[in-house]
Amino acid sequence: MVRVFRHYIPSSMIWLIGIETILLYISVYIGVEARFYNSDGNNIIIESELWLKALTFTLIMGGSLTAMGLYQRNLISDFASMMIRLFIGFGIGFVFITLAFYMFPELFLGRGIIIFALMSAFFSIILSRTFFQKLMNSKSFKSRVLVLGVGKHACQVEGLKSRCNDRGFDIIGYIPMNDNETLINDSLIIEEPESIYNYAIENGIDEIVMAIDDRRKKFPTTELLNCKMDGIYVRDMVSFFERITGHLQLDALHPSSLIFSTGFSHAVLQSSSKRTFDVLISALILIITSPIILLTAIAIYLSSFGRDPVFYRQVRVGLDNEPYNVLKFRSMKTDAEISGAQYAKKGDTRVTKIGAFIRLTRIDELPQLFNVLKGDMSFVGPRPERPEFVTGYDDRIPHYSLRHKVKPGITGWAQICYPYGDSEEDTKHKLQYDLYYVKNYSLFLDFTILFQTLQVVLFGKGAR
């Protein structure tokens, strides 16, 4: 795992991004050679500034593929999903490349070159991902992980085994450490060695995870210190889960983990760069989507013959638990909550026909851009909740109030990582992602979420 601006990215994914960036860049040169094969040198003028054109092609196509979620590790092994997103990503990239040619004619390459470049890039990426998948499935390229503990915490680690394999980790086994109960299968348990240090060295262990239920009973301080001094990483449960899952595990999260860990300060500071990002992105999207906003407003108005409002305002909890009015397109009947506040559910009969479409495509969220410009919200952050729900969650869900230490957002880490939730259990799961965002906030993470939000919209992930 590599930590880039406080955000964890699998090192294998860094390699894949680097390789495919090079492939995209080279594909333009291949396109030129293919187009002018056996020619008499008519490509000299094109090649004179080709590096800039190849760079533009690479940035646009790379951004498009990222927006399609093609750099999520779980998609590498899902060939069908990868191909669908790859086709759409190349289609969107082609549109933006064409727009770039019209806006900056000096970048023009020619239809023939672009077609050959796209074909070269497409098949090169398929080959690179086929090779990448085989390489990452090889145990020789995985970090060997030893887990201390066989109880409740160790069982949670075992539940992540498939994710660990996907992210380049191979769990070797579990060593009992006087846990109250044994929840790990006997076949996975390693008989406690005389020296954990010697066992780790002899078996090529790269990382040790502390999953002891009660550290007061037995904590091998000297052994672990020797391991660390010899270059073996020693992790606690919270940091291990954070790296593997991209969220903070509530069951393993203690106040000391929050107080002494790095993070939980950058997002709270509300830097000027964050505000600049919010204003620029929101203004840009408002300009681009203004025709959609206008058409949607007209459609909603005509659907009720002007009797019902086009927009609706609803009280949400904002920064430091301060209430504010969120602005959205009306997607439900005006009497939708005559019986009180409730979550939207699949096939919700309260949703209008136009409302079903704008909720699926997230068009109903666009008016919130005005909330961002006003300063009530950020573009990226935890989704705002209603006061009726927050009151109960603060009492029943540990650390829930921490999500209100930052401004709520139109999109967020939880929205791209977890589907729409309509229960308290779903709220707990989403909180784990929100806490990861608050802990590891950076503009890099905001841009990552911004790019991946596009694939959430296109594939209707979590819409209700």
Image (spheres, rainbow, N blue to C red):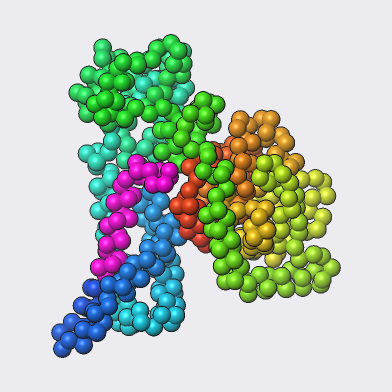
Position of 93 compared to 115: left or right? right
The answer to which of 392 and 441 lies nearer the viewer is 441
- Residue 423 lies in magenta, yes or no? no
Position of 413 compared to 196: left or right? right
Image quadrant occupied by the N terminus: top left
The percent position of residue 84, horizontal first and vertical second, equals 42, 62
The percent position of residue 43, horizontal first and vertical second, equals 22, 84
- Residue 23 lies in magenta, yes or no? yes
Q: In which quarter of the image is residue 120?
A: bottom left
Q: Is residue 17 above or below residue 169?
A: below
Position of 27 compared to 334: left or right? left
Q: In this view, does 429 lie above or below 292?
A: above
Residue at (69% x, 66% y) in the render? 354
Most prominent secondary structure in the magenta stretch? helix
Residue at (51% x, 60% y) in the render? 454
The percent position of residue 183, horizontal first and vertical second, equals 44, 20
Q: Give the range drawn in magenta.
A: 1-27
Q: Is residue 1 above or below residue 119?
A: above
